[in-house]
Image (cartoon, helix red, strand yellow):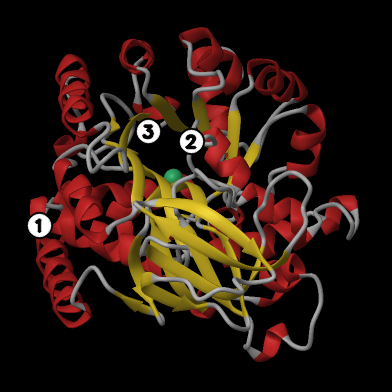
Amino acid sequence: MEREIDLHICGGIVLPMVEDGEWFRADLLVDQGRIVEIVRGGSTNPVAARRTLDAGEAAVLPGFVQCHVHVVQSLLRHQADGLELLPWLRAAVWPYEAALDGDGVEAAAELGIAELLCGGTTTALDFGTCRHHERVFAAAERLGIRLVSGKTHMDTGEGVPAALLEDTDRSLADAAALGDRWHGAAAGRLRYAVAPRFTLSCSEALLAGCVELARSRGWLLQSHANENVDEVAAIRAATGSSNLEYLHRVGLTGPDVVLAHGVHLEAQEVALLARSRTTICHCPGANLKLGSGIADVPGLQRAGVPVVLGADGAPCNNRLSIFHEMTLAATLHSLRHGPAAMPATRVLAMATRDGAAALRLGHEIGTLEPGKAADVTVVDLRGWSLQPDGHPAARIVHGATAGDVRHVVVGGRLVVVDRRLETADGGELRERIRSAWEATAARMRQSP
Ligand SMILES: [Zn+2]
């Protein structure tokens, strides 16, 4: 190669995650933010590159895509254990979100994003709180993650603190202004997704307004649905129909909609999801911790429902590791469907290619192919639980953890090198996180 390129990822086992599922030794050449060449067998000629990342004894994958996280909840990690969904929201999460100021939102977002990036997640679909959401985008812009995110909407509901109860029109106007400011920012790395929280905290007018706003701008829609039995029963009592029938009636289904959970679904609801091509984001870690139940992922996939993965929030998991979610997704469904139900290659596709498709970013990310954005995760294969050999997908899904991630590249930018976050000072960030949590906790103690 005559011209010097930006980055040479050298000597790894490459899993491109294209449909054929093959893997091979190769070098990855990156220039101007994009993959320019995948050199099978490794480059024989010396490569002139400004930076070289060693991927020897490592797997080179498309950056992981999580389709449901709440980075803004990260300060509440380990503070909301032992509760079911509705008490967890009313007694812990909502009072916490009500107490967050702008600095708290930004510190929480930085913590969540740092954890995601260092764990190999390069893209996330993220749910904000009601206020200060511009601070989430500011943190994402600085730290380098690819984030599809939106402020949440709540204008009704039992137990919602006054500080989070919004005027319906004001709430929609805030989202419109945020999306107009941030959708497409940072060279397209940041995108807006309209985020009505869930049926119980949104009036029908608010849900319909969210749908109208998103479709008028071409933004994605995200919400929570059918996570918990009490939630599903309360929705039936309030609306007279199943949650999915209700959401479908207000327009909150379709190929531009990602619904987190889908644990408790009636047969007609599954058919409706499949017919409308609505994506379900499976969050097994959160569903287990809150005791919500186990989504029937093999059943959903057989019915034709797109299913992707996400860690949800730090207070209900308590980590934001795609590896934890992949291991659970690959093992949990053996209970009902037998141990062959979720092969490692299928689970790995859910965490990469399928996630990208759900976010309508499949043309940009989700696989390693020349021309695509250089979102790359390099996973060290030297850990003891990864020995001796085997299919790399099985090693990653069943054996690896977030701690095995060695390098992470987003849009050609080196955000993690040799396990170190390059885009923030770790010591300063820890201090900001600690003081933001102390200030937030003090405000929570003061509130009625
Ligand atoms: Zn959630």
User: Label 3 belongs to which residue?
Assistant: 197
Quadrant of the rendered image holding ligand 1: top left
Nearest to viewer (mark 3 / mark 2): 2
Q: Earlier in the sequence, mark 1 or mark 3?
A: 1
Above or below for 415 versus 204 = below
User: Label 2 belongs to which residue?
Assistant: 361
Residue drawn at x 15%, y 52% as measured from the top left: 99
Above or below for 344 versus 399 = above
Residue at mark 1 to residue at mark 3: CA–CA distance: 22 Å
Q: Amino acid at mark 3?
A: Arg
Q: Position of residue 76 (x, y in %)?
A: 30, 63
Left or right: 368 as drawn, with respect to 100 = right
Q: Name the mark on residue 103.
A: 1
Mark 3 nearby-residue class (10 Å; few <14, some 14–19, many ≥20)? many
Q: Could you say which is closer to the camera, residue 392 or residue 306?
A: 392
- The secondary element bearing badge 2 is classed as loop
Q: Amino acid at mark 1?
A: Asp
Residue at mark 3 to residue at mark 2: CA–CA distance: 23 Å
Nearest to viewer (mark 1 / mark 3): 1
Callouts 2 and 1 close, C-beta under 8 Å: no
